[in-house]
Each structure stands twice: as structure tokens, then as C-alpha cells.
Image (cartoon, rainbow, N blue to C red):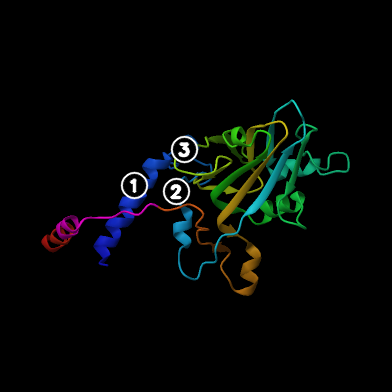
Amino acid sequence: MSADLRKYFLEAQEEANDSFFNYDGYDYFDDYDDFDDDYFEGDDDFDMASGSSAPTSQPYIVVIKNTATATAHPVTILGAYNTLKYNSATTPHNWQNAASISITMGISGITYAEFLYQSMNKPFVCGLTYYQASGTNAEAQILETLTLISRDVNGNETQKTLVPTIDPYQQQNSVIAIKFSYKIDGFTSIVISSVLQNTTAKLYFYPAETSSVSRTLTGRRAVAGYGSPHIIKQDKLTLSNSAIRKLKGRRRRR
């Protein structure tokens, strides 16, 4: 495939994705000249790590359970710099949330506290968030919004609300893939608008990039990229033969 055709396909696909997901993410921080304006990118960062040598992204899985039988509660996760002070014998599971809320990791042998510490020391760009629920109100749970909150030591704070939307063509009603890129570090927290009664929510954070200074000790780059986990079916752009001929003719005229 010629370079011009390949560029045309990539630009067309990017435009279609931006239109479909309705995320821009580029001008969101115009009011903060000194703030890190790359927290919520909104683009597909997996594309930057799509080379054959990039390992497939593996998720960090956070499990949030509400054991209450009649009450729903908003839940805050992450925000390690603030949240870790609640890591004590008296509040081992709810992490500043309601008493009926428990937060654990979905990978055996890994604690939520360890994940919080890692988010401080090894921040990452989340390229895809997989939102899954089970229990009494699973289908309603995945429609609860996620609010990303980021702050810095200068007192700047910004928010971005992600509104989950079920694809009308999908077969499952208790899972949603949210294709939106954002950074997670010790200052980033996520508020789930409500975890419904007798319901468990799982958030799978698929890293597109991770940053670790310790990698430089072995001569590697501090930032490592990951390939797409391919859990979302990608729409293919197909051009007719006449359209291809027109593109080729345009290239010749140049």
C-alpha cells in the first residue's frame, strides 16, 4: 500500500473514531497554563505502541463491592497520595468510603494498597477502561458515570466525566468498554457516581504506557509502550475501486 493511501486510511479512521466516541480531550485545560494538560488525552494512545515489539497491554483490575441490601453509595478510588492514609487496621477495606463498600484487586496476591503505591511510583496512561458489573443491579451499574479528578500541588484541579454508553450491537448488557485515554498517578482519583446495592463493579485499567525511572538502571527507556488488548472490534474502512483510482490520480497530479 502506498504511503499516501495509508495516510488517508489512518486519517479517515481517526476522524471516524473521534466522531463516534465524541471525545476531543485536547482543549480541556486551556484555563491552566501551568498545569499538566496531558492528563486526559481522549485519543487512542495504543496506536503509539502498535509496533510488533510492543507487548500486549495487561490490565490492573480494581473490584468494588457494595454489600448493603438497600443503599447505593458513591465510591472514590485511586488518589493514592490522599487515600493511603486510610490504610490502617480500622479501615482496611472501604478506603474512606461507606462501611458497606470494599475495594480489592482482581488479581490474586496483589493488594489494593500495593496498586496505590505503584500508581505513585510507576504512573501510567490508561488507554482503555473496561467496566464490568455483577450482582443484583449489574445492568444498571455499568451506566453509572465515572468522574476523573486530577490535581497538583499548586492547587489546580480539573474533572472529566465519562458517561458509559452501551453499544446497541453488543450482546452483553453488563460490560462496557470506555475508549478514552487519561493518565493515572498519585494525584488522580476516580469517582463512581454510585455503586448499587448488592452489586460488584470491576474496572479494568489497560495501560497504553507506563513510566518507571528504575528502567534506566538497566539501560532502557523510562517510558514503555504497550499494544492494544484488542477487546474492542475495530471497524474497517473499505473503499471502492473507483475511490482508490481517484486517490491515485490525485497523487499523480501532485
Q: On the image, numbered disc 1 is attached to which residue? A: 15
Report the quarter where the N terminus lies: bottom left
Q: For the residues marked 1 and 2, what is the alpha-carbon distance in whole angstroms?
A: 11 Å
Of the residues tagged 2 and 3, which is closer to the observer? 2
- At x 58% / y 71%, what residue is drawn? 220
Q: Look at the image and give the residue range highlighted in magenta.
A: 235-246
Q: Secondary structure at mark 1?
A: helix
Name the mark on residue 28: 3
The image position of residue 117, as x and y in percent, is: 73, 52
- Using the image, determine if residue 135 lies above or below residue 116: above
Q: Amino acid at mark 2?
A: Asp
Residue 253 vs residue 109, the one in the foreground: 109
Q: Residue at x 74, y 41 (%)?
A: 83
- Pointer 2: what residue? 43
Question: Do callouts 2 and 3 mark residues in contact (Cβ within 8 Å)?
Answer: no
> Magenta stretch containing residue 245, yes or no?
yes
